[in-house]
Amino acid sequence: MPKNPDSKFMSIALRLARRAEGKTSPNPLVGAVVVRRGKILGMGYHKKAGLPHAEIEAFLDAERKGHNLKGSTLYVTLEPCSHTGKRTPPCVNAIIEKGISKVVLGTIDLNPRVNGKGLKILREKGIEVKAAVLEEKCREINEPFFKYLATGKPFIILKLAATLDGKIATFTGDSKWIGSELQRKYAHRLRNKVDAILVGIGTVLRDNPQLTVRLGKKSNRQPTPIVLDSRLKIPVESNLIALQRNPIIATTQLADPIKLKDLEKTGARVLVIEQDENGQVDILKLVKKLGEMEITSVLIEGGSQVAASFLKRGIVDKVVFFYAPKIIGCEGVSMVGKLGVSEVKDALSIRTVKVKKIGEEFVVEGYTKEAG
């Protein structure tokens, strides 16, 4: 725990915010703590779109315990809203009414309807404001929210599991199990945070995946499965259809119209997207469409050609690569398909790289310079 009091209480607010990962989209994750003379009076977090914001939850928690909030300090991970939302009133009004004397926040809200306006109102009312406490961490938990606000498109994470020599399968196509149980649990925690999981039709035909979050009681709402399927080859009896999770099937005009109607009868949402120059689903147009559907984050899980397609188009924001202590050799399937890189200087660069150890495996996370 940080020794600095502001960092200490903001760290608590961040932990609270993370409790709702995967539940608040398209709203941000926000945590709040009310403090007076070093003592926590109340805590709260935004639990779901449409429910009270974190500040209100913290106030209610403090009042249930019999505390008067006048003269206290509010720690909140994101700038309090100053506008009336679809289902919630402005939080700045509640802050003023409760007699809060100081607000410490993690980061400004980039939403044009907020973006500094909340701070301006609070200061005009004589409330002391301190900004940018643990700002990097407060921004990181809401990467999808901020990108969606700026572009109207989802935040794209590319997740791949490979051997030390970068292979995701043997030459026979066998890929079970490259990673350990620990790695798979980590991957399920990633799934638990996103709105959707995307795979290519090859992965569906080969593995018949469920693409579910399996974390027991810690599982949030299940993310929406998305399948790239230019010619609508997905079997009606596949797990993604049979589990009735209303998957999104992205196809083209090449799809059989009868098969399309049969899939729609099962609850699947079939999106007919324009073809790219290779006759495949134009993923740029698909990503734009997903944004229009209020999908703010997508986890790509395979395969290698899908990974290459998204990387070549420059629409991957973050990579999460798992490496198991195994070697398959050059006959194996590479984790990323052809990118057409002829010189090292043209290779895709990854920035802000973090490396973690999970048991005997490593996970490498970073951001693409081409993202956005």
Image: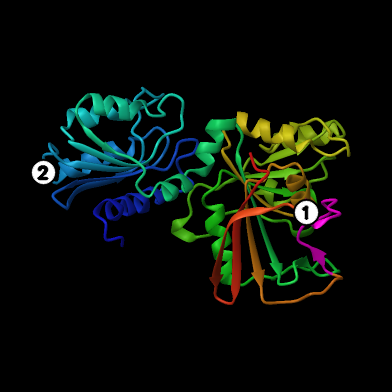
What number is the disc on residue 345?
Answer: 1
Q: How many marks?
A: 2
Question: In x, y percent, where is residue 131?
Answer: 33, 40
Residue 200 appears left or right of 87: right
Mark 2 residue element: loop
- Relative depth, front residue between 118 and 148: 118
Gap between marks 2 and 1 measured at Cα: 63 Å
* Up-down relation of residue 312 to residue 353 (above or below): above
Question: In x, y percent, where is residue 90?
Answer: 32, 26
Residue 154: in magenta span:
no
Magenta residues, start to end: 332-346
Mark 2: few/some/many CA within 10 Å (<14, 14-19, 20+): few
Residue at figure coordinates x 72%, y 44% from the top left:
227
Residue 256 visible to an observer of this rendering:
yes
Q: Main secondary structure of the magenta part?
A: loop
Residue at figure coordinates x 34%, y 50% from the top left:
16
Residue 56 occupies which quadrant of the picture? top left
Residue at figure coordinates x 28%, y 24% from the top left:
121
What number is the disc on residue 66?
Answer: 2
Q: Quadrant of the N terminus?
A: bottom left
- Relative depth, front residue between 299 and 33: 33
Residue at figure coordinates x 33%, y 33% from the top left:
80
Residue 321 appears left or right of 329: left
